[in-house]
Image: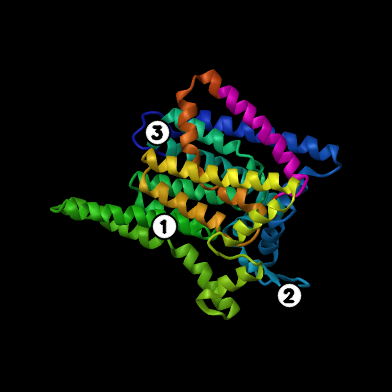
Amino acid sequence: MTDLGTRTEPALRRAAPALLGYAAVRALGLLALALWSAARDKNAYTLLTARWDALWYTRVAELGYGYEVRLPNGDVHSNLAFFPLLPWLERLLSATTPLSYADAGFTVSLLTSLAAAWGIFAVADHVYGRRAGVCAALLYAVVPVGIVQSMAYSESLFTALAAWSLYAVLTGRWVTAGLTACLAGLTRPVGLAVVAAVWAAGIAAFLRDRRAPGAGADRTAVPARRALGMALAPLGTAAYVLWVGYRTGRGPLGYLDVQAGWRNGFDGGYAFARFVADKFTSFPSALAGAGLIVGVGLVVWLYVVCARQGQPLPLLVYTGVVTALALCASSYFGSKPRLLMPAFPLLFPLALALARARTRRSAAIVALVALVSALYGAFWLNGSGPP
């Protein structure tokens, strides 16, 4: 993961503009959050580390699994819904440093957000060139809900693992791809998207091999490593899901029962469509409904553009699965923007457009969007925030 293909420049030096730009944008977001929170007499660090999902992760790190909340309507919110890699890292960091579990979660997010930006740069650089790679990393930094990248959530960790797994697939590092996909599968349920990308690329490669018979002994190692990578990829997700089934006594589908306790499932987008339709029952909320329709339309349009521009198969498969799981989940509609955040290949058409523009124009656009994103993130986190 430290050698960007056959580039002559050292990897870190090649990625430096992307990483420095990304860090600057995220620093602006944190500064805006600190100032906005202070004006409202709130603690910005608490908003980042001790609310919503961050609390669930730290409870897992501190107390392990088994904690649940029973709501008056009968729903059961179990911490088994939260995959274990982030809590494991929080526990490890807290045990080896003076950091608290919350501090450890924040540290992991900061470090892995940089790793995610680097991975996004690496993928875009490999497919489209360095300038597009820098623009892709900057666009990832300025997404409206980019503040989540600095929270003690698992999005940054997952995106880093997904990006480097995809890069490994694109460059033929199959064992690395399988290992990082396995770890992604221990981070979030959407790790299935990374597994699907590895398997789609692997199957396509095996089919190409069959159309080119006569491989000698020197080529047999490549299919073997590819098969090993494909075998490793689903182990993380499978291991945790099966363990939850054993822990709950409900068999292989036990994890689905845990998610049902949160009223979260996959219904093909029916509940989300009803949610949007309900917005049109009154005038003020109708504006929000129109905005949601425009947002979903933009996501679909970007995916179509990605396909038309000939994005590699693993990127299209990964993005398609992430997008489908985000838009077609039956609950937590306010979370959909952050659930879409790992679908970073959707940003590549925009990155290409920025890369082709003059440097001054691109810089001005990114600066303006970064400011808007920072202000929105501060407003959002001090308000309803990400559930």
Q: Which mark is on residue 128?
A: 3
Q: Nearer the viewer, residue 47 or 262?
A: 262
The range drawn in magenta is 363-385
Q: Amino acid at mark 3?
A: Tyr
Residue 208 spot, x, y in % from top left: 23, 51
Q: Report the residue at 40% width, 51% height from top.
A: 176
Q: Is residue 124 left or right of residue 90?
A: left
User: The N terminus is located in which quarter?
Assistant: top left
Element marked by disc 2: loop
Q: Is residue 14 left or right of residue 250?
A: left
Q: Amino acid at mark 1?
A: Ala
- Above or below 178: residue 294: above
Q: Report the residue at 62% width, 70% height from top.
A: 260
Q: Are marks 3 and 2 in contact (CB under 8 Å)?
A: no
Residue 122 lies within the magenta run: no
Q: Which residue is mark 2?
A: 74
Q: Which residue is mark 1?
A: 196
Q: Main secondary structure of the magenta part?
A: helix
Q: Nearer the viewer, residue 369 or 134?
A: 369
